[in-house]
Image (tube, coloured by chain):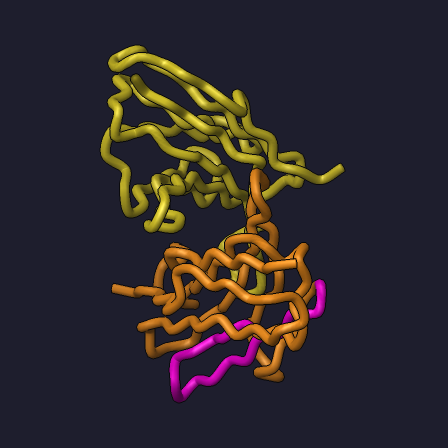
Chain colours: A orange, B yellow
Amino acid sequence: AQSVSQHNHHVILSEAASLELGCNYSYGGTVNLFWYVQYPGQHLQLLLKYFSGDPLVKGIKGFEAEFIKSKFSFNLRKPSVQWSDTAEYFCAVNARNRDDKIIFGKGTRLHILP
Amino acid sequence: EAQVTQNPRYLITVTGKKLTVTCSQNMNHEYMSWYRQDPGLGLRQIYYSMNVEVTDKGDVPEGYKVSRKEKRNFPLILESPSPNQTSLYFCASMWNFGAYNEQFFGPGTRLTVL
């Protein structure tokens, strides 16, 4: 069965620090990959997505992610975080042409200190 | 405005009292899905629907029912709620389960079962 692992459950950073959140998935075929963000008290919003093409994907709010097929990874990065980035981040994977489910990771809670 | 709406947003109920959480989307999306979000467990899919009159179980369907009589609506029914169904519920929709689509999420329904 597919699975998604987010290695960091809770990350605390100071403003202007660089961020990298890990995401690994377990399916060996073609995948669609997503990062969603959930700000406190709000619903999930799409940060970025990878379907095909350039493995370095740029999203909203200065976030980017790199798909490394050989490592089954899709890590989220931001060079300089802001206090407003405090939120929970979810990686999600859909195994294309396999089934009709989108599997979410357990989330990483990011807390930015002002 | 394109959106997914859920009602109610907050609900406190007692064990065994049947309830329905409504979900509606105005984007003519074919695919709709229900998730529950619990601390440390991320989002887990309850049920999904590929189109009208087509529904299928997700990862945690026990204790829930759904129906898809119209394209825009996908209500979640708890026939006999129990305290372990206390959770934050999200409805999501997507154009279809194709290769290049993303999900749009509703604002969430926080359910407490006493």
Q: With A26 as the anchor, is B108 left or right in this view?
A: right
Q: With A43 as the anchor, is B41 left or right in this view?
A: left
Decide: is B40 above or below B66.
below
| Spot occupied by residue B44 in the image (x, y as percentages of width and height) | 35, 47
Q: Note whether residue A103 is visible.
A: no
| Spot occupied by residue A42 in the image (x, y as percentages of width and height) | 59, 40
Q: Nearer the viewer, residue B33 or A84?
A: A84
Image quarter (top left, top right, bottom left or bottom right) of the C terminus of chain B: top left
Residue at figure coordinates x 47%, y 84% from the top left: A68
Image quarter (top left, top right, bottom left or bottom right) of the N terminus of chain B: top right
| Spot occupied by residue B31 in the image (x, y as percentages of width and height) | 50, 45
Give the mark count.
0
| Spot occupied by residue B36 in the image (x, y as percentages of width and height) | 39, 39
Residue at figure coordinates x 44%, y 73% from the top left: A22
Residue found at the far bottom of this picture: A70
Q: With A2 as the anchor, is A82 left or right in this view?
A: right
Residue at figure coordinates x 35%, y 65% from the top left: A4
In magenta, the rendered stretch is: A61-76
Decide: is B20 above or below B52.
above
Q: Note whether residue A56 is visible.
A: yes
Residue at figure coordinates x 43%, y 78% from the top left: A73
The question of residue A12 being in magenta is answered with no
Q: Nearer the viewer, residue A66 or B5?
A: A66
- Find residue A36 and report its image quarter: bottom right
Decide: is A83 above or below B1.
below
